[in-house]
Amino acid sequence: MSNVSYHISNLLEKMTSTDKDFRFMATNDLMLELQKDSIKLDEDSERKVVTMLLKLLEDKNGEVQNLAVKCLAPLVSKVKEYQVETMVDTLCSNMMSDKEQLRDISSMGLKTVIAELPPSSSGLTLTTSVCKKITSQLIGAMGKHEDVSVQLEALDILSDMLGRLCGALVSFHSSLLSSLLPQLTSPRMAVRKRSILALGQLVPCCSPALFSQLTEHLLAELAKGPPTSMTRTYIQCLATISRQGGHRVGEHLEKLIPMVVKFTSVEDDELREYCFQAFEAFIRRCPKEMSPHVATVIQLCQKFMTFDPNYNYDDEEEEEEDSMDIEDGLDQESDDEYSDDDDMSWKVRRSSIKCLEALIATRRDLLLSFYSSICPALLSRFKEREENVRADIFAAFVTLLRQTRAGSSPHLITTGSDQGANREEEPAVAMLKKQVSVIVKALHRQLKDKSIKSRQGCFCLLTELAHTVPGALEQHIPALIPGIVFSLTDKASSSTMRIDALSFLHVLLLSHPPQTFQPHMQVLVPPVVGCVDDSFYKITSEALLVTQQLVRVMRPLEQSGPAGGFDVKPFVKQVFSGTLKRLKATDIDQEVKERAISCMGHMVCHLGDHLGAELQGVLAIFLERMKNEITRLTAVRTITLISASPLKIDLSSILPEALSVLGSFLRKNQRALKLGTLACLTALVTHHTAGIKPAMLEPVLNELPALVDESDMHVSQVSITLLTCVAKACPSSLAKIGSSVLPGVLGLVHSPLLQGGALVAILDFLQALVLSKTSNLGYSQLLKSLTGPFHSSQSHPDSPAPHRQSYHSVARCVAALSAACPKEAPGMVTGLIQEVKNPGSPESARVLALLCLGEVGRSGSLGGSKEVQGVILEAFSSTSEEVKTAASCALGSMAVGSLTDYLPFLLKEISSQPKRQYLLLHSLKEVISACPASSLSPHVESIWALLFQNCQCQEEGTRNLVAECLGKLTIVNPAQLLPRLKQQLNAGSPLARSTVVTAVKFTIVDQPAPIDTLLKDCIGDFLKTLQDEDINVRRVALVMFNSAAHNKPSLIRGLLATVLPRLYKETQIRKDLIREVEMGPFKHTVDDGLDVRKAAFECMYTLLDSCLDGLDILLFLDHVEEGLKDHYDIRMLTFLMLARLASLCPGAVLQRLDRLVEPLKATCTTKVKAGSVKQEFEKQEELRRSAMRAVAALLAVPEVERSPSMADFANQIRTNADMASIYQSVQGGEGGGLGPVESMDTS
């Protein structure tokens, strides 16, 4: 300790030296000391250091002063509070000094101190007391001081402080407001500007009353009709406070808008600019409150975006536009009395266009009207003469295109036929298509403009257009190509300009058919190859991508015949030599290396037969690149591409070495490389069988066993696909497979995780293996290995029981083997029947045998054997639930295989056996799901009648099954059956209605289907059941609505206006549904409305993802707020919604923040009663974690802590150890035990 004091007192001594160099070095050393975290100062040293530094601020030498200021920053956190106050006092009084230099250095000092103070939310008193000191002094300085520079500095520091530490100054807000408002009338422009900035910083965190006071003041002043320069200031202030205060302006818009509109008619360009900036701020911050005024604003923008009083556009007709530049030059010279520098009208045009852009960006719902109103206006202004304004016009149009693209959702309804797909095209896209020729006409000349900014704007706009409407530019390619070539070859083009031109060309080549470009190859190839040779790596890299596309366009492999009639010979050499130079270079950028490999790969793949002797050299380079760690992945992908080329490229020169290198990659711990390598090997084995000797595959096959493992199903699937190819192509190399890979494959079959693609791969592999007849693994061997574990589980009591999923996997494998060896099948079926009949065989074996019979029967190879029917019926009366379920599965599968044999039998059983109805309906569901529509149609009537006999069953499980069958049956013949479903809504009991509505849920599938267009027309009728008097019908209607919103939002988007009020109504707690039940001595309340409310909130959650733009977020938040005080399950859901909303529409959430914080606070601070059961504690803990996640999401919203209530709550969390620890764990994501609701999977 004394050591530090001694060192510092030494430095302080040197600081008093007369030699400025000594002082400088000593201050520098002190700064380095203070920056160390470990340094601790005693009280005496603190005092001395502070006094010394304040004295050095007045040093004669400027450099010493600057260093002294830098020392203040680390000092703030190292000294006691009262020392910081001393520093601040001295700095503030120095601000009033007459010496200008001292004033400047002190204000720098104050800014430094403010930047270092801990934020007010950290709860330290230091910040608050220091801020109060500074503020009171600065307010005084502003009022008293005659010198403008003092005022400016004071305003500057205040803005800084309000921006960082607004919360600490709450007590000063009103005095700050009253001292800042008079500054708005200052004669000095700079003072007014800085006062506006300070007010902007004050607005977000002041109370609503103060905000109103400020707005009222501005309105009152504007109403007096002050001189134009003052009006400018007030309007500018309005724009700033709406930008900063956001939604609060909403309440005052009714009075503000007419005022601002009035001032746009004043002949003053700057004032008009500020008016449009104010409009822009209103639109961005309060889109909802602006709705009634949108038309007015658009009208004004359209009027002023063409406001150019000093220039006449109508003189030159379209043809003469090229000579415009020259005329422009002449005009300026002859016109001495008026110079262009005085012309401020461009500011008005620019601000009105920015205002339109804000409108387009915030109001997607008005997109169609924008196409008729704003789009033509913007197009007509593409000829704008002022470069900056033109750039903004392009930007606004790009925003329009992006909004259009955001709207053309992937959930478009398409029917099977093509014209159906076109008919449902987004109306906005259709309107845009009509404008394409106008856009190109307006832009293609500008692509040769001298101004680089204009050309970049054009390319950006055209790129966006090509993304939004792929293929729309097809007719216009000839008009665009000269412009692209000009930018690529023009000596004056900057590198970014060429990159933009290349990336646009790349998008064009990708989104339009090849034959469009083939006629232009002469013009396109030379400049692109020139760019490949450019010295700047980014241009080279972009040019290689384009070259790769050009190669594919020259000779698309999809076309039959020799290159579709286009002669590629003249271009091959040019393209090849340019790319080869880059491919050979090893001292270039990583990205260029990769793209050169990929580009050359495409060239070999598409033009390999033209390369002649060069080809082998290129392949050798690829092999080299495969051995290099940096380029190996790209090289592997390229070899994959080449080996699958229809040109049958000869790879024999590199095959042996390539296979051993690829084998070694399978050991590497890089997943992408493994997958790439497996794909490459599969392609090589499939297309180059002749060149591969069994010995060459050894290094690969040795690596495969380790890859077949349930921990990575995708890698396993690709590995098994490779094995299948090997079994078909070179079966002799599989001799040793029994001991190596096969146990892994069988292990996968018995794994509970096996499904989908991996299972299909295994089925193919087993069939290929049996047919290859090479290994000693015949049909019976494989069968035994598959079914073994199910027989042995009884005899070895300690072996784990097989998982339910694995029964189905094994059954499918058995069926696949029998399909491959039809001679063996009958014997095996007999064995399976014996197995089921034998009462001594273990349950697992009987279940498996039934499922195998079902899967074998699915292929129709059982016929209508009466014996099998008898076995199944017998199994239905088994005592074991597992056996019954397996029998119902098997019956369904067999019926799929031969409908005529089994379906009548199944329907007869359903009507005659009420006890087994549930199991038999499961079989029927399987039949309806798996049979093609054509074979089902003769039976539809009988099934339909049977289902409707059972749709009023008391058992909910049975009713749901009936509903699922009805729904899936309706998909078979929607035109006839959907109207019949609709009729059933009016007939029947509540139970029947609930079954019908649930059936509709099953007609909604997530892929496009023919039923969609019919459903869209009548889903509204089914949703009317949301007003049904029966609570259960309302609940299933909500579930059905949720399914539609999730899987096919386009079905219900148009109905939101009618459905949402009904949906919101269901979220409310109804007293009449809450009843008390006596359980012995206790009374227990039961809420019958809970399930319906839960379903309603689930719908709300889904709508956030799929139909956000159709929601009125503020109304939505009202109901979320109610849900935050509801039952446990609903609170969990609303916390999730709140977190989602915070990221989707932070503006609206900020608007409601004060009301949302209370319920969150209540949840986080509630304690469970001491004597409660364990579940209560767990529930409460889960609630608190979930609430804390919502709080964390809210705290991630910028500016949220400017809300006093939120800052308060954040402070409370930080200071309360219990809450802080929950917050920490939620933030770090190490909350291992997240409840199921948390990760609500809505995929």
Image (tube, grey):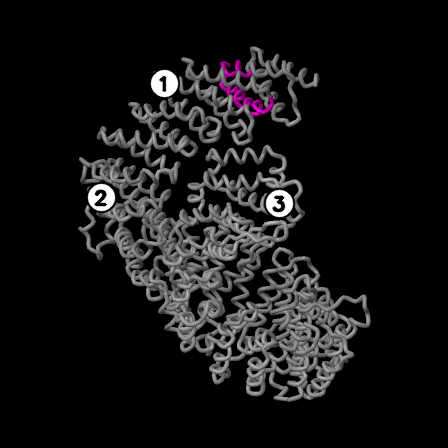
Identified at 26% across, 52% down, the residue is 377
Does residue 265 lie above or below 840 as drawn? above
Which quadrant of the structure image shows residue 612? Answer: bottom right
User: Which class describes the residues within 10 Å of circle 2: few (<14), some (14-19), or many (20+)?
Assistant: some
Task: State how far apart marks 2 and 1 are (Cα).
Answer: 43 Å
Identified at 42% across, 44% down, the residue is 1148
Q: Which of label 2 and label 3 is nearer to you?
A: 3
Q: Where is residue 466 in the image (x, y as percent from the top left)?
A: 39, 60
Kindly identify which numbered label has been placed on residue 933: none
Q: What range of the chain is rendered magenta?
A: 52-78
Q: Which amino acid, by three-letter code, is at mark 1?
A: Gly
Q: Can the viewer see residue 1007?
A: yes
- Say which residue label 3 marks: 1181
Does residue 426 lie above or below 87 as drawn? below
* Nearer to me, 216 or 941: 941
| Magenta stretch contains residue 238 | no
* Nearer to me, 467 or 691: 467
Q: Of marks 2 and 3, which one's residue comes earlier in the chain?
A: 2
Identified at 37% across, 73% down, the residue is 419
Q: Where is residue 153 in the image (x, y as percent from the top left)?
A: 41, 23
Q: Position of residue 386 (x, y in %)?
A: 28, 44
Q: Where is residue 152 in the image (x, y as percent from the top left)?
A: 38, 23
Q: Of marks 1 and 3, which one's residue comes earlier in the chain?
A: 1
Kindly identify which numbered label has been placed on residue 143: 1
* Nearer to me, 771 or 57: 771
Quadrant of the snapshot with the N terminus: top right
